[in-house]
Structure formats: structure tokens, C-alpha cells
Amino acid sequence: MPFLFGKTEQLGLVGIHYENVFYETVPWTGTMEWEVHDWGHWRLTGRCTSKYLSKKLFEVELIAFCPPDVPGMKLRAPTETDGMVYFCRDSFYGNVTLSLYELEYDKDSRSYVRAKDKEPIIDQAVSDQCAVEIGGGPWWDIWKGKSVMKQPMKGMVKFPYVMRRTKEKLLTFLR
């Protein structure tokens, strides 16, 4: 949770590099939601819906789990009040399923939906080489969250993206 001017925000990120394209779901380009269980199950979904900040609009779904016989390793992590304490658990024996869909704007619903006439960019790719982690609170129970980044932080984080895209468009125009 970033700390700025005495306030914290819940943030999430999924980044995928596939076929020379970097797909990044972050709160300043769209939405990010998660459901993290106290151990053994993670679900992350994200949408990039900012045409100005990304060349492709997309949705990602990532589901990870650890088998019940994998307890994970307890690790120290920084806390706000108690310093470094055993507060995290992680494992490199996670299993993951990843799907990536192109989005298109639907005028009827006034929202972005999965492209109807296109196959998924990645359709349920699976791997048993996934690193998973829980740590800190509120992971005492199921933790559901949604990234909501407010101004001025959102504008400050977006600024480099906006400048890069502006530069790319200007260079394309001048060629």
C-alpha cells in the first residue's frame, strides 16, 4: 500500500510479457481486483481500459493455488509498528492458470467487454512453476479488494505514460 501525504491505498498489478507485447494491469490504466485466501488460493483480475496509456485494451485473469500438502515458508516482513516479524508465507510450488482477452467497447452497455469475434490472446495457459505469497493483514481471512487510485497520486503515476505516448505519436507524425 503506497503511502503519500499520510494516506494509504490498496494497489494491485499483473504484468505479462507475451509475443513482444507488455500487458500491464494497474489502477492508473484500468482496474485490478483480487481475492486472496489465508493460504492456498489466489484470484486476480485486471482490465486495461485506457486507450491513451496502452496500445491494446485487455482483461487478464490469473488463478493460482498451492496443493494442501505445501504449507509454504514463513518469512520476515516489515510492519508499520513492529519492525521485521514473521508475517509472510510463500512458496515456489504454486500452480497457475492465466487467461488474457482483448477488450472492445460495447455501446449498448457503455462498457468494455471481451471481444466477441476474437479468440483469447492466451487461453488458460497453465504452469506448476508459480511463486505465491501471503503476508501481513488483512490475510487472517479471505481478503477481497479492488484497486482504487485517487488523485493526485493517479495523475502523478500516469504522467510518464502520457509523456511517452505523446512522444511516440509525435515521432510517428513527423516521419
Image: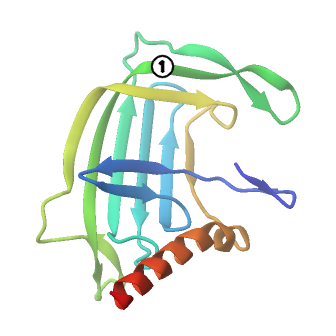
Front residue (pair 100, 109): 100
Q: Three-letter amino acid code at disc 1? A: Ser
Please determine whether, in this image, residue 31 is positioned above or below residue 140.
below
Left or right side of 135 for 126: left
Pointer 1 residue: 91
Left or right side of 145 for 167: left
The quadrant of the rendering that contains the C terminus is bottom left
Residue at image x 51%, y 38%?
Answer: 36
In percent of width and height, residue 143 lies at 58, 41
Please determine whether, in this image, residue 125 is positioned above or below residue 20.
above
In percent of width and height, residue 33 lies at 49, 54
Q: Quick one: label 1, few (<14), some, or many (20+) residues within 10 Å? A: some
Q: Secondary structure at mark 1?
A: strand
Residue at image x 87%, y 57%?
Answer: 6
Front residue (pair 157, 148): 157
In percent of width and height, residue 15 lies at 42, 49
